Image (cartoon, rainbow, N blue to C red):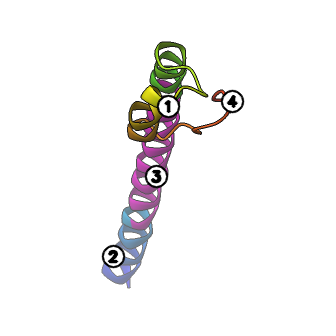
Amino acid sequence: MTNERTAYLEAGATQRAEVAKGKQARALRDAMIKSITARRKKVQYAADAKWPAGKTEHVQARKDFQLPAKRPYSY
């Protein structure tokens, strides 16, 4: 019985370790997504300042940066 109990306890420890790894990986992923989103917004605001809305010569640049063609970028 001792061996079976030990195997049972080790299996539980392994599962808890995997759960902890999963939580840590998800937290890292969420932090990376926040960082990417913040940097994307910064680039879009800079592009909006460089190529203001409403001018026909800026339409392609605004489209490349996924900015609205007829109004300033706002998030």
Q: Nearer the viewer, residue 68 or 5?
A: 68
In the visual, does 15 lie left or right of 48? Answer: left
How far apart, in angstroms, are the residues tagged by discs 4 and 1? 20 Å
2 or 3: mark nearer the eye: 3
Identified by mark 3, the residue type is Ala
Where, by quadrant of the figure, is residue 9 drawn? bottom left
Pointer 4 local density, CA inside 10 Å: few below 14, some 14–19, many at least 20: few
- Residue type at mark 1: give it: Thr
For residue 20, the mark is 3
Kindly report the distance in space between the C-alpha atoms of the residues bearing marks 1 and 2: 71 Å
Whole-Å distance between the Cαs marked 2 and 3?
Answer: 20 Å
Q: Per the image, is 30 magenta?
A: yes
Q: CA distance from mark 3 to mark 1?
A: 53 Å
| Disc 2 residue type (three-letter) | Ala
Which residue carries the number 1 mark? 56
Q: Nearer the viewer, residue 5 or 24?
A: 24
Lower sequence index among marks 2 and 3: 2
Judged by depth in the image, the label closer to the viewer, 1 or 2, is 1
Q: In the image, which is nearer the foreground, mark 4 or mark 3?
A: 4
